[in-house]
Amino acid sequence: MFFFKNTRDIDEVDLGILKKVITQLETPRDQRPLGSGWLSGSLALLASIAGFLIVLLRWFPETFSYPEIAFIQDSGVVTAFLRFVLLSGYALSLLSLILSRHKSLGWTALAVSVVASLMATTQPQIASDAQQSFYFGLDYFIINVLVVGFLFVPLERFFPARGEQTVFRAEWQEDMFYYLVSSMLVQVLGFITLAPSNYVNAQIPLDDVRIYIVNLPFWLQVVIIMMATDFVQYWVHRAFHTFPVLWRFHSIHHSTKKMDWLAGARMHFVEIAVLRGLTAVPMFTLGFDPAAIQAYLLIVYFYSSFIHANIGWKMGFLERFFVTPRFHHWHHGSDRDAIDINYASHFPIYDWLFGTHHLPETEWPENYGVVGDTVPRGYWRQFVYPFLKPEKKEPAE
């Protein structure tokens, strides 16, 4: 039996466990061959945490539920999915414990799964079906991270562009926090995103255009949305690179020194508001079918993670027509040839047309990040960084 003299002893134990888990997640690739239990342990931890968050969501649906996807809960899918996730957490954690010499991932995932299972058997009476006027998108975060994470963690494990890079590289916790913030504030971001479109709808009569577009084939509407939003996004993105006051916000996104599926989440709140608000104007003003808009949004969620991911697939002729990881990695490069290029997010044709296309035959950029490494580390320091007065460089003697 363990005895702790004070809460400090407990805190030290908790921090020790957390440090071991993080160390295991960041294990170098050459130390986690197939069969080492690392992949099963990582996925077990992801599943167990997702299960815990789903239970928390069911306890407080009026606070953490995003109304746009409330139909998922009403359909009963969540209950079946919760059982699947928890069982996956149990099975994968046990597999990791069997295979791995280092048991931190397996035991932690197993413990979280047990806690989530116990919580799932009860539900506090304070929960209600009434939706609050202000809410946080916890379910939105769960779906994004769980689905995207389960897809890209194995892909980066088996098809890495940079084999020496760990799947959970340095600063991954920071970028996960960015993911959490943008998901939880989905209501605020949704209001900001629709504001410019609502203004255009109120000022410009587009009824004839909307009638024509809504009658187009579904697939064609999706293509037009992607082309139109990417055109606007290209110029907004280029403006963030051109004007110093905007670059200070966008430099946060470029500050990551290693690219993976989480790197796309690192964006300053102001940039998210501006980028989403302006690029959404054609999508919400031209009369597209809501189903086509939802299909586009689904594509974007996966595509953004894909082009940032550490995936070394050779895409061949497709690189001429679609933005690929190698194309976008060059945009994030800090090499001389990688500065201010490849602004498009879906179609490289815009970079071809406006003189910013750069994609060597087979090469990838050598380094990533902001030249000079001027952006501080940590979410809150990065949040205030664009508002601070730039430091003046001393003239060279």
Image (cartoon, grey):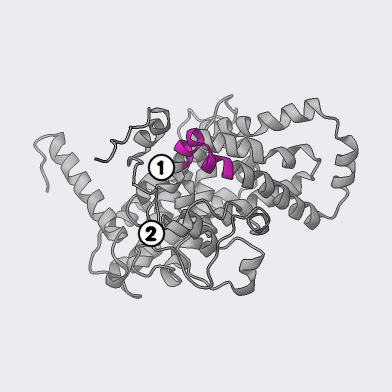
Start-end of magenta stretch: 237-250
Identify which residue, 328 or 304, lies in the foreground: 328
Could one spot residue 216 in this view of the protein? yes
Q: For the residue carrying disc 1, how many other residues have a C-alpha within 10 Å: few (<14), some (14-19), or many (20+)?
A: some
Instruction: Decide whether the magenta segment is chiefly helix, strand or loop.
Output: helix
Alpha carbon of mark 2 to alpha carbon of mark 1: how far? 24 Å
Q: Which residue is mark 1?
A: 177
Q: Position of residue 115 (x, y in %)?
A: 35, 47
Could one spot residue 59 in this view of the protein? no
Identify the residue at image location x=45%, y=33%. 124
Quadrant location of residue 91?
A: bottom left
Quadrant location of residue 32?
A: bottom left
Q: For the residue carrying disc 2, how many other residues have a C-alpha within 10 Å: few (<14), some (14-19), or many (20+)?
A: some
Identify which residue, 228 or 107, lies in the foreground: 228
Which amino acid does the dot numbered 2 rest on? Answer: Asn
Q: Position of residue 58 (x, y in %)?
A: 51, 40
Identify the residue at image location x=61%, y=48%. 76
Q: Position of residue 198 (x, y in %)?
A: 73, 29
Q: Which residue is mark 2?
A: 367
Which amino acid does the dot numbered 1 rest on? Answer: Phe
Q: Is residue 100 above or below residue 297?
A: below
Identify which residue, 88 or 276, lies in the foreground: 276
